[in-house]
Amino acid sequence: MATRNGAALVELRRVSQRYETRERTFTALREIDLVIREGEFVALLGPSGCGKSTLLRIITGLQVPSDGQVLYRGSPLHGINPHAAIVFQTMALFPWLTVQQNVEIALKVRGMAPADRTTRAVALLDKVGLDGFESAFPRELSGGMRQKVGFARAMAVEPELLCLDEPFSALDVLSADALRAELLELWTSGAIPTRAILMVTHNIEEAIFLADRVIVMEKDPGRVVSELSVGLPQPRHRRAPEFTAVVDRVYGLLAGQTQPEHVELGTAPGEPGHTRALPSITINDLSGLLEYLAGLPRPEADLYQIAADLKIDSDHLLRLAEAAELLGFATIARGDITLAPLGETVAEASIQARKEIFASRMRRLPIYRWLAALLREADRQQLKAWVVQRALEIEFPPAEATRQLDTLVGWGRYAELLGYDDSSETITLETAAAPAPGDSGVSSSSAR
Amino acid sequence: MEIVRLFDIRQPRRGGLGSGDLIALVALGVLLYAGVRLAHYAPSRILGPEISLAPGALPWYAGLSLGRMAAAYLLSILFTFVCGSLAAGNRTAERLVLPALDVLQSVPILSFLPVVLLSFSALMPQGIAAELASIVLIFTSQVWNLTFAWYQSLTTIPTELREASAIFRFGGWMRFRVLELPFAAITLLWNSMMSWAGGWFFLMAAEIFTVGERDFRLPGLGSYLQVAARQGDLSAVIWGLGTLIFVIAVLDQLVWRPLVAWADRFKLESVSGEALATSWALQAARRSMLVDWLRSRVTRPAMERLDAAFRHPGPAGEPVAAGGPRRRWRVWLLGAIGVGVLVYGSVRAGMLLSLVPPTEWLSIVPALGATLARVLASLVLAALWTVPVGVWIGSRPRVAAALQPVVQVAASVPATALFPVLISTLLRIPGGLSTAAIGLMLLGTQWYILFNVIAGTTAIPRDLQYTTALLQFGTVDRWRALILPALLPYLVTGALTAAGGAWNASIVAEYVEFGGHSVHTVGIGARIAEATAAGDYPLLLAATLAMVLTVVAFNRFLWRRLYRVAEARFRIE
């Protein structure tokens, strides 16, 4: 850790990743420029679907980008980077090998003699605090201990570049905290020969707790929107005002800013302009957030504070906030969320009244209007789910189209606007949702 | 209950017929045609070997039968690793191999027996021909589900495990040994057990196949049983059956059980509450000093050598997501040759089929209908006794545990081995062979249904059982609201497998040599056997093809749809 701002280890030049479906080409990553220097701990932070894991796979050579250049120590990378190792989100340990064998296997492949690799594996397991568990199988260990094996295996090959792919997100809060502290200790004390660490995460606090530099990404298409140096000395304290100030700033970057309604809602699928994807959340969770906000003494709250109070993941919270904003229940500015009067009404309303308010707000969403218009024109006002899925795939990649469909149907069922029959996989327009005379702004022309 | 897994493997993916299926079916027809062409040159009189009924000959016969099984199994495993890996790693291969496997595993293999036997006897001396034919037949009965299982597990290995082996630079060998083989170990093992059980069925049939002047018998347990039954030598029958059961039980205790218990380590995660498989043989081996010595002195160093020998020296591995260079022209060339052979073969097959007189074609239809009726009758009969008994056993864990080995041994006795023994008794029931054939089919099919009913019953969640008890459901309501719906997916799976077995059995059940003359009834199996006896090759091809098509069509258009509906509506997660 002696050399900060050392020589460039990894350099990405205008790296793009595209993939094609039957309908069109989607851009998963757009023109990413990025440098990771020796001595740095860099975090790639962004919402799910922003392509940060893809970027990590491109950097390690597991995946070849459609465009752009990947340089390692100044020369183009061909195939898998032999100087990199990955710690995976799911740990990716071989369940049929013991803890020690899992670490040794990486050394065996490199041709190390049996005696040497045993010595090194045992020493590393000792270092991460797993002595005594050498002959255990991964399934006998807790999540935190399993991830320690993941770290030991990655460090065994003495990588120059250690890549962490959401390594703490599958762990419970306490083990994740402990493991983060241990990683920091190994890194800052220089006990491992690693030159740089690259971590992918969607957890804002985690990124700022660990990294020297945070690269903030956004989705649709995946791109780098901002970069900030954390500039706080280690060890960092989560409650310290300097720390929360940085967290707040990043929330400000990621939560965005409530726009005028026509911009906020976007356009319907198939129409020119940006189609706003619905954040995939359940209405139950949204109601929970609104009730929580309504119970606060002040109308406006810091998002980072809510994440800490409700103990929810920043990614989940941002999606909930986005949904609240989209439906007009709250506004967001500079990392703060403010409950709108309508949101307050929802928080205090009865179940039936809630449904009605929600239905009226949902009718304003272009994507719902589009679906309603499709259904109205269909025979008996119903469509097979796959038809709608196919139609959505013109706008979204297949996986996202499925998510959009699920969210739409989930919200529509709650609002009693849509019906869904699972055995025939049919979506129906509820009769109450059919165009009543003079129903505000719902015209079939909006679908075209 | 472990059995569930066994039948979960064949996941039907879709109904209907695709272009890949058509290619596979045409290829099958051409292959059959080639076999039938060769059969022209088969000797019209074939003498079987002398079978000694002395109990002292039994170890030798058992060894011969076992050797055929082992040879076919080895072939199957080799084929599996090559073809399964090819299909998993190459798009073009995948599009050809998958539909082919799918059609082949639903084809009644036994209907090929006459064609295979005749064509082989035309090509080589009788002894070798029958040996090879039996091995080929067992191979074709064992291999498809193994290949399918291997392919499926190759394609379901979690991405992150694949990425881990890439980033830590595993070569092909290490990937096979440390990732792919262990990941597939459990399904391969269960499928191997299933394949062996199926293999015995076909081996027995191949060893005792005689029609008219043609006696294709092979020295082995199956022919021993047949000769003993024909001569009415009861003590020899008992000796023969005893030996067969003994061999199967020994294999179960010394090979499969230890392997299953040992393979526990390959489970991805342990499911709490699931009883671990145990094996006394494995326990003993683990305690044994000799095994210990072998492991530390022989297997481990050998493995180390092997790993070192296969270690790839290259500095960088291949990216996981990138494809290698394609040798397009080779694929095209092979494809063109394949299409040429198929077209030529199907034209010739068509010409041969045109020799079948219309009256014969007309006789195939009622024959198919009669066999179909028997298959369905055997399923209904099997369901009638297995559902109540299976539910009774399945809802009593202790009984299930105690009965499981008994049921397994009973089920593993190949029905084809019992045919010659039971035929004299069954022929006396009203309806003669026509109804007796149903009984013979039942022998083979009932177990599949019973296993699945037991498995389905044990899978009914306790909470739901308590709920029906608390709500004081009567017996009728309990069956209607809980037991039957919960059993439905299992019943359909069991019936699907059982129907396949019943069609197969028809070949040996509808035409029997008994007491010096042949007895036959109306049925497609009988048509095939008669055509073999008479040397009527166009009819043999026509009847075999008709049966294959009927079974494949039934699988696709009936069973799979039923299965999907049952899966979607009634599977309890």
Image (tube, coloured by chain):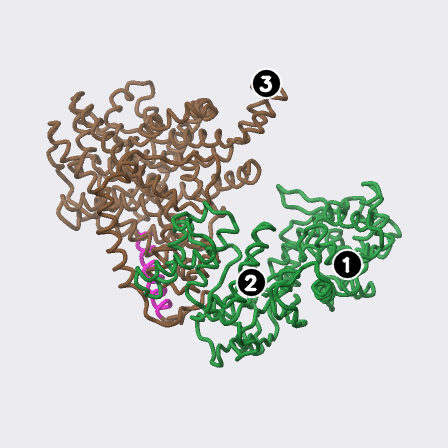
Cα–Cα span, label 1 and label 2: 28 Å
The answer to whether any part of residue B356 appears in the image is no
Task: Identify whether B223 is placed above or below B138.
Answer: above
Residue located beneath label 3 in the image: B474
Q: Chain of mark 3?
A: B
Residue B274, picture quadrant: top left
Q: Circle 1 is placed at which residue position?
A: A302
Q: Residues within 10 Å of mark 1 (few under 14, many from 20)?
A: some
Q: Give percent across and percent down for residue B91.
A: 43, 61
The residue beneath circle 2 is A184
**Residue B334, position as x, y percentages in the image:** 34, 65
Mark 1 lies on a secondary structure that is strand
Q: Which residues are magenta?
A: B330-351
Q: Position of residue A143 (x, y in %)?
A: 52, 49
Q: Quadrant of the C terminus of chain A?
A: bottom right
CA–CA distance between discs 3 and 2? 64 Å
Q: Position of residue A146 (x, y in %)?
A: 48, 52
Look at the picture and state if A174 lies above or below A154: above
Amino acid type of the residue that numbered disc 3 sits on in the rendered structure: Gly
Chain assigned green: A
Q: Residues within 10 Å of mark 3 (few under 14, many from 20)?
A: few
Secondary structure category for the residue under label 3: loop
Chain letter, colour brown in render? B
Mark 2: secondary structure: helix
Labels 3 and 1 within one chain = no
